[in-house]
Image (tube, rainbow, N blue to C red):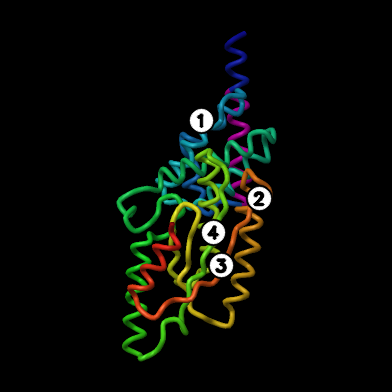
Amino acid sequence: MDTALDARTIAAQRALRVEWAARSLDTAWAFPSDWGTPAVEALCEALVLHGDVFPPAERLGRARADAGIGLGETLADIDQLAALVPGRYAEPMRRAVSLGWADGSSGPTGHVFDPLTGLVSTEYLELRLGEVYQAAAAASCSVGEQHALVVVRLELPSTRPWERMLPMILLGECLRTVFDAGETLARLGEPMAAALVPRTPTLVGRLRLLNQLLDRSVVRASDTPGAPARVWIESLPADHQSAKWLLADLGR
């Protein structure tokens, strides 16, 4: 009897894995050879046995980050699995995968990139601003006329760690989607991020798009429905030192 149960469990696990792989490779996964990992097997086993999916899903997130796979593709893959299993597993899997991915993405570049969001550090943004101010001085023009900071502040009322981490991860994804032309995107603190952007005629439209993306992903992922995400344009001061003081004030 136990052997038969084991055989049925193995068969169900394999069937779930095959269907998940087929859906992901059709819609969400760019390179088939990178999809399979022992963490996939562990997550399928937990689902078939109605066990705790959090540990294997977190392990899968770390494995994806270690393989250099982005959070967006990782979550799209998990969404394909969530469509095949009871709905109660969807959010725990997304949360666990996001936390595992954030943990796995930390590495030797951590002094430049924030491992949670993939955004650069405040210190790196200060260096980029120094270059911008030097270039403006050489051209005898004003930095404030040519560049600005787009600042995003999230209201994160929850005290539970994963509920404060996931909105920041999604914020990084939204910024990279809107500002994808070489702009410097930085994390200023737990609830804040900023983009160093040129003042162009399209800037207002890009802010509108950013607000829409934040509402669809970050705000709706929050434990508090309607939790606001504030977005505004911050003018740059006349000199680099004042800009550094501005970043310090914004990050508090």
Residue 108 x/y as whole percent = 30, 51
Q: Secondary structure at mark 3?
A: helix
Mark linked to residue 153: 4
Residue at 45 percent of width and 71 percent of height: 196
Residue 16's image quarter? top right
Q: Position of residue 142 (x, y in %)?
A: 41, 86
User: Type of residue at label 1?
Assistant: Ala
Labels 4 and 3: the sequence-earlier one: 4
Q: Nearer the viewer, mark 3 or mark 2?
A: 2
- Residue span colored magenta: 10-27
Amino acid at circle 3:
Val
Does 72 sit above or below residue 163?
Answer: below
**Sequence-first disc among 3 and 2:** 3
Q: Which residue is mark 2?
A: 220
The residue pinned by badge 1 equals 42
Cα distance, mark 3 to mark 2? 18 Å
Which residue is at the front of the view, 187 or 156? 156
- On whether residue 18 falls in the magenta region, the answer is yes
User: SS of the residue at dot 2?
Assistant: helix
Question: Looking at the image, which residue is at 40% across and 44% down?
Answer: 104
Q: Are discs 3 and 2 less than 8 Å apart at CB?
A: no
* Residue 182, image quadrant: bottom left
Q: In the image shown, does 217 or 240 lie closer to the viewer?
A: 240
